[in-house]
Amino acid sequence: MPDHSTPLIATIVVGLGLAFAFGLAAQRLRISPLVGYLLAGVAVGPFTPGFVANAALASELAEIGVILLMFAVGLHFSWRDLVSVGAIAIPGAIVQIAVASVLGLGLAMLLGWGLAAGMVFGLALSVASTVVLVRALQERRLMDTERGRIAVGWLVVEDLAMVLALVLLPALAGATMAGAVAPGNLLVTLGLTFGKVALFGVVMLVVGRRAIPALLHYVAHTGSRELFRLAVYVIALGVAFGAAKLFGVSFALGAFFAGMVLSESKLSQRAAEEALPLRDAFAVLFFVSVGMLFDPTVLLRDPLGVIATVLIIVVGKSVAAYGIVRAFGHGHRTALTISASLAQIGEFSFILAGLGVALNMLPPEGRDLVLAGAILSILVNPLLFLVIEKKLPAAARSPVPPPAKPAPAPADAGHEVVVGYGRVGALVGKRLAAAGRKVVVIEAGEDAAAAARSDGARVITGNAADPEVLAEADLAGARRIFVAIPEAFEAGQVVQQARAAQPALEILARADSEDAVEHLTRLGATLTVMGEREIAHRMLERALARGAHRPGPAH
Ligand code: AMP
C-alpha cells in the first residue's frame, strides 16, 4: 500500500475513486449516488477488511466540503431572506429540536442510559445535515423556492443551536460530575457564546458586507481569473476558519455568512459560484467520511435500538416539522418538502455524540446508534422525496419573457471593437469586416484569436476586463464596442471602463439574464441584448406568423 508515506493523497484518491465507482453503480441502479458515496466510505472504513483510509484526514477534507457548500448556499441567501423566513424557521427549529430531544431521551431511558446521556442523544438526533439537505434541494431545484429558503433558514437556526450545545456540553458535564449544578457558570458560558456569535454576526454585517464584495471587485479588475478564483476560495475558507477560531462559530455557519454578504450583488454572487468547481468533489468526501465511521455490526448487536433511532429521525422529526409548518399557515407541499429535507441527521450529530462519549456523558453504544441512524436516514432520504414527488404535481413553468426593445443605430468614423470572438463575437466581426469596417478584436482564447486574425481583424489577446488590455483597443478613438462575452461580471468590468474611456461611445452588450441586463445597463451599456429573450422572440415570430391552426399558448 502506498499510503504510509502519503496518507492525504491516498485518502483523496481512494476516497474519490471508490465514491466515483460506487456512485456510478448507484446511478445505474437508479438510486441516489449519495448511497454509493456512503458505501464507498464503509468500504474504506476501519470496520470492513481491506484498505483503511485515514479517518481524521477524511473528516477534515469533508469539512472543506461543508465550508464550500455552505458558502455557496450563502451566496443564494440574502440577509433579507433570512429575516423573512425567521418567523417560521426559529420556532420551527426549536419545536423540532424539542420533539426530537424528548423522543431521544425517552429511548435512552428505555435503554437505561440515564438523563445526561439521554439529553446528548436526543440533541444529536435533532439536527439535520447541511450537506444532505443542500444536495437534496439542489437536485430538485428547490433552492430558490420559498420552501427551500424556509428549509435553509431552519437549518441555520439548528446550526446555531448546536453551536450552543457544543459549547454548553462540557460545562454541563462538569456540573453533573461535581454533583452540584452551578447555574452561575452555566449562565456565563451561555452569555459568552451568545456574545461571540452576535459579535461575529455584527462584524460580518458591518465590515464583511463592505470589505468582501470590494475585494472581489478589486480582484476582478486586475483581469486575472486565477487570482479571482483564488480570492473566492480565500474568502470562503478564510472567513469560515476565522469564524471558528475567533468566535467559536461552526465552519459551516462562518462560510454561510461569508456567502451571504456577497449575495447582495447578484453578479458577484454568480461569479463566485462559478469559481467553486472544487466544491462538489469535497462534498463527496463528506459522505465518504461519514461512511467510514460506520460499524455495520451495530445492526446485529442492537437492531431494535437502530430501528427506534431511525424512526425518531425519519418519522418523529417529520411529523413535528409538518405540524408546525402547517400550523403557521403554509401549504401541504411546503410542509412536506421541509419535513423531508430535515428528516435526516449528519455531521453535527457525529460531533455532538463524539463529544458526549469523550465527556463520559454518552455510552459508546449511543454514538453507534447515532451513526447508524445517520447512515440509514441519509439512505432513505431520497426515497422520502420520491414519495412526495409522486404525490405532488410538478411546479408550473415560468412564462416566456417579453420581446426586447428595438436597437437605435447611429454611426460615424472610427474602428469597431469586438470583445470575445466566440459564437456571438465571430458573427459580428465577420459581418463588420465584410462591410469594410475596421475591426479590433479582444480575445482571451488562442484559437478564437487565431480565427479573428484570419478573418482580417487586428487582435489583442488577453482578458478584456484587464484595463491594460482594454487600453490597447484605443476606445477613445473607437466608433463602438461590442461586448460579446457570456460572463456578466467581466462584461460589466469592460462596459464600465469603456464608458469611462469615452462618454459618447456606443456600447452594445450581450447578457444572459435579467440581472445581467440590469447590471450592464446601469454600468453604461447603450443597448443590452439578452440571448434567451431573442431566442424566444424568433421562435414566437415564426409560430405566430405562420397563422396557428389551433389556439397557441398565451406567449
Ligand atoms: P461564446 O460564448 O461562444 O460567444 O464565446 C465567448 C468568447 O469570448 C470565447 O472565445 C472566450 O475566449 C472569449 N472571452 C470570454 N471572456 C473574455 C474576456 N474577459 N476577455 C476576452 N475574451 C473573452
Image (cartoon, rainbow, N blue to C red):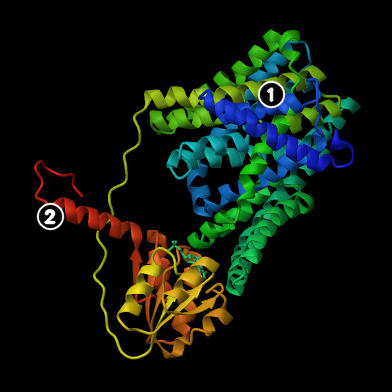
Left or right, residue 119 beside residue 24? right
Q: Nearer the viewer, residue 426 or 117?
A: 426
Percent x, y for residue 278?
64, 49
Q: Residue furthest front?
A: 454
**How much space separates mark 1 and mark 2, taking CA atoms?**
65 Å
Q: Nearer the viewer, residue 235 or 200?
A: 235
Q: Nearer the viewer, residue 406 or 456?
A: 456
Q: Secondary structure at mark 1?
A: helix
The three-letter amino acid code for the residue at tag 2 is: Ala
Residue at position x 51%, y 28% in the image = 339
Q: Nearer the viewer, residue 108 or 301?
A: 301
Residue 297's image quarter?
top right
Residue 129 appears in view: yes
Residue at position x 57%, y 34% in the image = 93
Q: Could you classify mark 1 by the number of other residues whose Cα lies within 10 Å: few (under 14), some (14-19), or many (20 or more)?
A: many
Percent x, y for residue 369?
72, 18
Percent x, y for residue 516?
42, 63
User: Number of labelled discs?
Assistant: 2
